[in-house]
Image: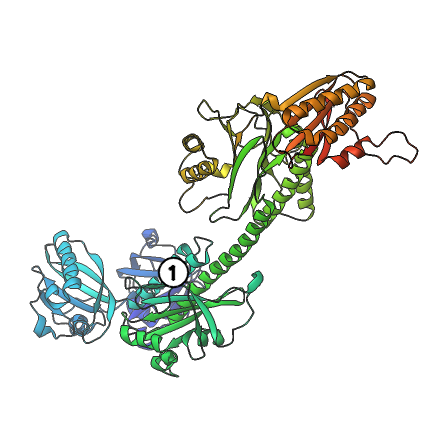
Amino acid sequence: MSPLHPLDEAATAQAVIDGNGTLIHWNEGARRLLGYPSEEVEGRPAADLLASPDTGALPGAGDDRRSGVLALRHRDGRVLSVWLLAHRLERDGGWLVLTPLEGREPRPPQDPLVRAVLAQAPCAMAVYDERLRLHGLNDAMSEVIGLPEDRVRGLRVSEISSRGAGERLERAMAEVLASGRGRDVETYARAGGEDRAHHWLARIAPLTDTHGRVIGVCVAAHDFTEQYRARERLQLVNEASVRIGTTLDVTLTAQELADVCVPALADFVSVDLLDPPENGGEYRVGPPAAPVTLRRAAHRSVNAGDPEAVIRPGDADVYPASSPQADSLIADRPLVAPNGDGTLEEWLSWDGPHGGHVREYGVHATMSVPVRARGRILGVVVLSRFRRPDPFTADDVLLAEEVTARAAVCIDNARRFSRERQTALALQRSLLPRSLPRTAALEAASRYLPAARAGVGGDWFDVIPLSGMRVAMVVGDVIGNGVQASATMGRLRTAVRTLADIDLAPDELLTHLDDLVVRLSTEAGAEGTAAEVGATCVYAVYDPVSRRCTLAGAGHPPPVVLPPDGPPRRIDMPSGPALGVGGLPFESVELDLPEGTVLALYTDGLLESRERDVDTGLRLFCRALEESSQHLEGAVHAILRALLPAGGAPDDVALLLARTRGLAASDVATWDIPADPALVAPIRKQVSGQLEVWGLTAATFTAELVVSELVTNAIRYGEPPIRLRLIHDSETLICEVSDSSHTAPHLRRAKTFDEGGRGLLLVAQLTQRWGSRHTPEGKTIWAELPLLGEE
């Protein structure tokens, strides 16, 4: 290691010891201390200089520094007690050992260097006595307060400084004087002769006499304005990351951006966005051309009511070239006014109302920052200052860019979410029934509500007329949200309708639906889709003749039933596995529903909430249903109002209410048919007589032909027992023939000389619709005849 500067060589004794304990350097100061010239000691063990081998090493003060007193032997044989300081050398692991040779004698009372410390130190310092009266201050503190020492000596700090800051500082000084413990105080005040305030850190320390009694305090003031502003900028960036983007709403996100910037960065902030392209397209790449049409998304002011705003949120305005908004967007970078190229007045001369507002409120600085995300410009943020006297700095521009960039990504995410939500919602509504069919079996009301903030899900409902005046009701929920969930919902709803048309029992229908969901999940996995397809569902079939209802569920909340003479209750039924699990059975439950019973089917979004548990939600649901069940549409509104928050549902909600009706026994006629073709003619006469009793004589001819063909077909191809049933309401006459054979009938084209084979073809031509369904005893062939022209 090279020695110190020659001017300092004799003032400090220095030696360098390598990692093996050998002296490798010895300076002139070391020769003065111990008398050895360098040629006598360099290359020798350092331990040879110890007065005794048992003296030991320096006490450790850390891994890289040691200090302490050692007994060393002088060249003339004397033993010297020397305080040594040793530093570890990074290069080779050795040590630099040194000790001062000067400055050990006591300083004179009037030492000029000591006296100059208080007066000439760059740190502003002041001394206050035990009455907290100014005793003295240095030149730096005199500049801070803007007054000479001889004018303010004897005053308290609250009498020198502004009342608020001075009183806070004086209270802290009193605490230090009383406790004897120093403390730091941050304050905001103007320095003498300056027009803007600084952030100060005042370090207050007690002053004691030789007996340890506190006789005053010392105040050292440090201007840490830049550090404070840096801390403020970091805090603003942190707040922006926390406060901006809490929702997926473009307007709310823009408002969050404005709220974060006021008053931390500006006194008034406006956020103006470009209108989204038509048909859900993307914004163009690159800056727009002037003039630019922008729509006010949000603004915020330090003044209540935002009086500085010329445009209200939601309104659009056209900004020509030379306006702050257009210039910033065209340049695609932040612009600050006033700047070296022009004045703020010139920049805002493009519009009279804007310029008038600038003059009225005293705006002296404006900054425009483009809102840019994923390479596309979405709008512009304009920040103005009129209460804060300082202009925008380069650091302010960087900070505004950082905060705006974070907000831009959130705004773009919200925009994309809104676009996808609208698409999914349109798809969802197109796939749901526009209106519920009118049936003789029940009166129904329904409602679908998309989630207020989350993506549109896959909830659905349906009412499906079946044969024999029966009706099916279904409510389901596809796992997930967005367009994919809506599309899956459409496929499942179509599948349910198709399976319902072949009159499958509820448990069988769910089995087939489960197979479909498994296939959809397999297809999704083959396409690389991240999530598997899954759904829940409840399916119910109500027969108004028997007034019985058969239900089956697949992982779905069970329906609620409200009897005409009792309280509402949840139906006790097997929940079943969710659709898509595959391979597990579904079970049906059958129950009697007296006429006037209200059946409520719903999705879990109706009951689930962060503010309450499911049981509480179920109690609210039952209470609202019971209190408003006289009118189903009113009941739907009452239930939604009781269970959903004012801001909208947190999850998709589907609700279906149905009030059962029953057919009177006089509207149903049944005959047991012997398996004898010769008895078909008497059966036709009995049917004719029954239609006359019902006042349906206009339908007699068609009904006799249909009954003749269906009964003949059952006698010829079916198995006894055979039964004929006629059902009618104001619009439809239904003919049903049942037998114990499970063989389904089918249409076929008869050849020219065939004597038979035309019966079902004739039935299909004469009726509104016909079909067959399997029953536990066999099958039933049915046909519907319209009665719209009957008296």
Where's residue 497, x and y in %? 65, 38
Tell whether 589 sits left or right of 117.
Answer: right
Per the image, the residue denoted by label 1 is 46
Q: Nearer the viewer, residue 172 or 777?
A: 777
Q: Nearer the viewer, residue 400 or 727?
A: 727
Quadrant placement of the N terminus: bottom left
- Amino acid at circle 1: Ala
Where's residue 402, x and y in %? 43, 65
Tell whether 79 sits left or right of 637.
Answer: left
Q: Nearer the viewer, residue 479 or 432?
A: 432
Residue 10 visible to an observer of this rendering: yes
Where's residue 443, x and y in %? 53, 33
Placement of 8 over or under 642, stated as above or below = below
Give the residue displayed 53% in from the left and 47% down from the top. Answer: 456
- Determine crowd level at label 1: few under 14, some 14-19, many 20+ residues with C-alpha closer than 10 A: some
Kindly indicate the quadrant of the structure image that contains residue 778.
top right
Q: Secondary structure at mark 1?
A: helix
Give the residue displayed 84% in from the left and 34% down from the top. Answer: 748
Q: Nearer the viewer, residue 300 or 72?
A: 300
Placement of 383 over or under 606, stated as above or below = below
Tell whether 455 sits left or right of 161.
Answer: right
